Amino acid sequence: MKKIQILGMGCSRCHKLQQTAENAAKELGLAYEVERVTDLPKIMSFGVMSTPALVVDGVLKVSGKVPSMEEIKKLLA
């Protein structure tokens, strides 16, 4: 099961990243769980300086932007 974490304080871009990541995982047929991380010290522990950020299985994949569906699919595969 993939663990997808969305790091951010709840802005519209954070919500878009979560929705796009969930849709990408569904299209790939992956078993996944999503966690929203809004705690600033925890976000910073990933080395993130700008949100939103996407973490997959504990590895920071992208921060500061909302990647396209195709980009996210590649990051999840």
Image: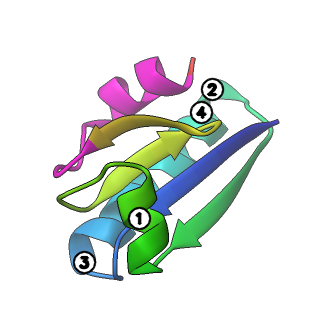
Residue highlighted by disc 2? 28
Q: Residue at x 73, y 32 (%)?
A: 30
The mark closer to the camera, 1 or 3, is: 1
Is label 1 in a helix, a strand or a loop?
helix
Lower sequence index among marks 4 and 1: 4
Q: Which numbered marker is on residue 12?
A: 3
Disc 1 residue type (three-letter): Ile
Quarter of the N terminus within the rendering: top right
CB contact under 8 Å: marks 2 and 4: yes
How far across and down, in percent of the image, does residue 69 sit? 35, 36
How far across and down, in percent of the image, does residue 21 sit? 48, 47
CB contact under 8 Å: marks 3 and 4: no
Q: Which numbered marker is on residue 27?
A: 4
> Could you give the CA–CA distance between mark 1 and mark 3, rounded to whole angstroms?
17 Å
Disc 2 residue type (three-letter): Leu
Quarter of the C terminus within the rendering: top right
Residue highlighted by disc 1? 43
**Magenta segment:** 63-76
42 left or right of 32?
left
Lower sequence index among marks 3 and 4: 3
The mark closer to the camera, 4 or 1, is: 1
Q: Which numbered marker is on residue 3?
A: none
> Could you give the CA–CA distance between mark 3 and mark 2, rounded to whole angstroms?
24 Å
Residue 75 lies in the magenta-colored region? yes
